[in-house]
Image: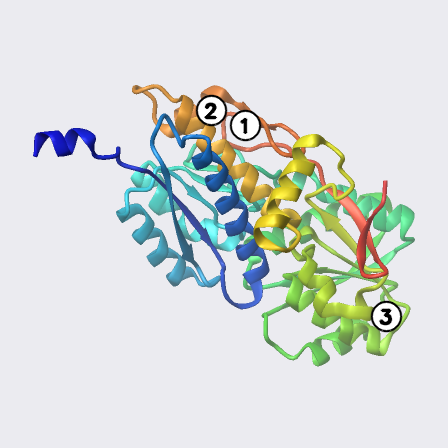
Amino acid sequence: MLGALACSPPEPVRIGFLGGLSGRVADLGIGGRNGVILAVEMRNRQGGINGRAIELIAEDDQQDVEVARQAASRLLAGKVEVVIGPMTSAMALAILPQFDAAGVPLLSPTVTTNALTGLDDQFFRVVAPTAAHVFKSAEYHFRENGLRRVVLVWDLLNRAYSESWAGDFHTAFVALGGEIIAEVGFASGQSLSVLAASILAEKPDGVVIIANSVDTALLVQQLRMRAADLRIGTSEWAATERLIELGGRAVEGLVVAQYIDRDSTTPAYLAFRKAYRERFRHEPGFPGLTAFDATNVALDALATRSDSQTLKQALLAQGTFAGAQSSIKFNASGDTQRDTFISVIRHGEFESQH
C-alpha cells in the first residue's frame, strides 16, 4: 500500500472558469472558456505546474446573479486555487464577496466596471476599467464620425458595466463639445421595434449602443429599417464575430470598439491565434484572447509563488506578466492598463482604424 501511494500521481492543480455559457452572452462565455482551455492544455503539455497536472472546472453563470453565486460556491467547494472570470461586471459584483471571504483570487478577462477600481480585494483583471479607455470611443465619434447629438442606449441587466461605460462616454463626449440628448436603458429581450422607434423620436445624428452582441445586432437591424443612414457605434462588449453573423448587412458601417488589435503581427499573438483556430475552428476574438492571457497570468503566478505566499501576494509580487499582444502589469489593487482599438465593420469584417 505504501509503495502504491508513493507511485501515485500528485494531486492536480485545480482552477475554475465562470462565465455565461448559454443565452445571449454565450459568445462571450464560450470564447472565454475556450481561451482558458487552450492555455491549460498548452501548459499541461509542458509538464503542468511543477510536475502537477492542471485540472479545469468550468461553470455557467447564465448571466443570473443567483445562478452565479451557486456556481461560485461549487467552485470554491472544489478547492480551486483561482477562478478565471466572470465575463461580465454584473456577475463580478455579485460573487466577489464569496471570493474575498474564501481568500481565492478572481481573475477576470473582461470585467471593466469602475466600481471595482482601486479596492484591496481578491479581484484582478487583465483589461482596463472603462474610465481609462472610453474617451477613445468618444473622441472617434466626435472627430472622425462627426457626431454631435447622440442617444446612448444601454443594457440594464449588466448595469455595472453599461452604466459605467455610458457615464464615462457622456463625460468625454460632452467635454469635446457634443451633446447626449437622451440615455435609454433596456432589458434584454424586450421589444426592440418599440425601442428603435423611441430612440429615433429623439432625432439624433448618432446612436451608441452598450449591450451584448445579440441585442446590439438586432437593435441595429431595427434602427436601419427606419433610418438606413443613421451613424451607429457600440462598445467593446458587442465586438465578437457573432455581431457580424447576426447583424448581416445592417451592421455594415457600424463603429465598434475592441479590446484586441486584430491587425497585430506580434509573434506571440499570431501563434496564439493559429493555435486557437486549429483547436476550436473559429476566431478567438477578444474573449478568447483576454481569457488566454488571464489564465497564463494565473498559471505563471501559481508556478512561481513561494510556500509562504498566497496567490494574491504572488500576483502582486510579480506584477508584470507576458500577454499575447501586450504585457499585463498589475498595480497594488489588481487593476491594469490595456489599450482599446476602434474598428468599422466593412464587407463583413472588422476593419481597424489606426
> Mark 3 or mark 1: which is in front?
1
Residue 52 in the image, given as x and y percentages of width and height: 33, 32
Q: Which mark is residue 330?
A: 1
Q: Quadrant of the C terminus?
A: top right
Image check: 264 left or right of 28?
right
Give the colour scheme shown: rainbow
Name the residue type under label 3: Lys
Q: Residue at x 20, y 31 (%)?
A: 7
Residue 153 shows in this picture: no
When the figure is inspected, residue 72 is found, relative to residue 309, above or below; the finding is below
Q: Are marks 1 and 2 in contact (CB under 8 Å)?
A: yes
Q: Which mark is residue 203?
A: 3
Of mark 3 and mark 1, the one earlier in the sequence is 3
Q: Which mark is residue 316?
A: 2
Q: Secondary structure at mark 3?
A: loop
> Mark 3 or mark 2: which is in front?
2
Front-most of residues 340 and 42: 42
When the figure is inspected, residue 8 is found, relative to residue 285, above or below; the finding is above
Name the residue type under label 1: Phe
Q: Are marks 3 and 2 in contact (CB under 8 Å)?
A: no
Q: Residue at x 54, y 56 (%)?
A: 30
How far is the residue under mark 3 from the one under mark 1? 43 Å
Q: Residues within 10 Å of mark 3 (few under 14, many from 20)?
A: few
Image check: 315 left or right of 183?
left
Name the residue type under label 2: Leu
Residue 226 in the image, given as x and y percentages of width and height: 84, 78
When the figure is inspected, residue 10 is found, relative to residue 254, above or below; the finding is above
How far is the residue under mark 3 from the one under mark 2? 49 Å
